[in-house]
Amino acid sequence: MDREMEAELAFHLERDVEQRVARGVAPAEARRQARAAFGGVDVAREAVRDERGTRWLEDLMRDLHRGMRSLSRRPLYWFTAAVTLGLGIAATTAIFSIVSMVLLRPLPVPGADQLVAFGQVVRSRRDASPSLSLPTVRDLRTLTDVFEGVVAGSGEVLGIRDEGGEGAV
């Protein structure tokens, strides 16, 4: 396509030169005037490429070629870039895997969608984390029938809602 475009631009430029020579202008001066009137071959070439609508593809191919040529001149730089990119992808994958396991997947217990966490916030404490005392946990186990079971652990109490239960505290 570039060869066709070059040939067409050369044709138009020569045609203009011929017309100027036919009017009596010296050939060297006719060529100079034709180039000046044409507005520059490079400008016309870029305008034709823009009109084609494939400029982005040509730029991409030119950038890839230039990048590969540059990387082939400096293999250590290429190796460092590839290792850095690989480590970045590996670290991102590892972090996402951990987040997925911990936060996104349901708990590996039967009826995980029916687990309820509840507690009591003590405002006098600085951390204000929800917690229940051991006697309160025992009372929840024995005195309420809303939950199938009550389990306490590390400052939180988990209750498993039974099928007929309307809700939990």
Image (spheres, rainbow, N blue to C red):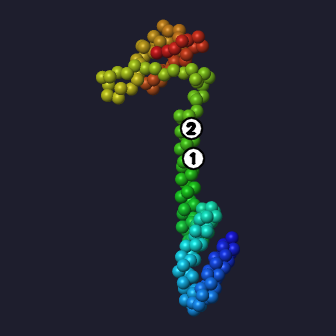
Any part of residue 148 in sight: no
Q: Position of residue 158 (x, y in %)?
A: 50, 21
Q: Residue at x 43, y 20 (%)?
A: 119
Secondary-structure class at tag 2: helix
The furthest residue to the bottom: 26
Q: Position of residue 49 (x, y in %)?
A: 61, 67
Three-letter residue code for mark 1 = Thr
Q: Residue at x 55, y 54 (%)?
A: 87
Which label sits on residue 60?
A: none
Q: Is residue 92 above or below residue 160?
A: below
Q: What is the spatial separation of the Cα atoms under label 2 and label 1, in whole angstroms?
A: 10 Å
* 84 horizontally vs 10: left or right: left
Report the residue marked by disc 1. 93
**First reached walking from the N terminus: tag 2 or tag 1:** 1
Q: Residue at x 55, y 57 (%)?
A: 85
Res 35 quadrant in image: bottom right
Q: Position of residue 26 (x, y in %)?
A: 57, 92
Which label sits on residue 100?
A: 2
Three-letter residue code for mark 2 = Ser
The furthest residue to the top: 143
Q: For this rendering, which residue is in front, 164 or 137?
A: 164
Res 59 quadrant in image: bottom right
Label 2 environment density (alpha carbons within 10 Å; few <14, some 14–19, many ≥20): few
Secondary-structure class at tag 1: helix
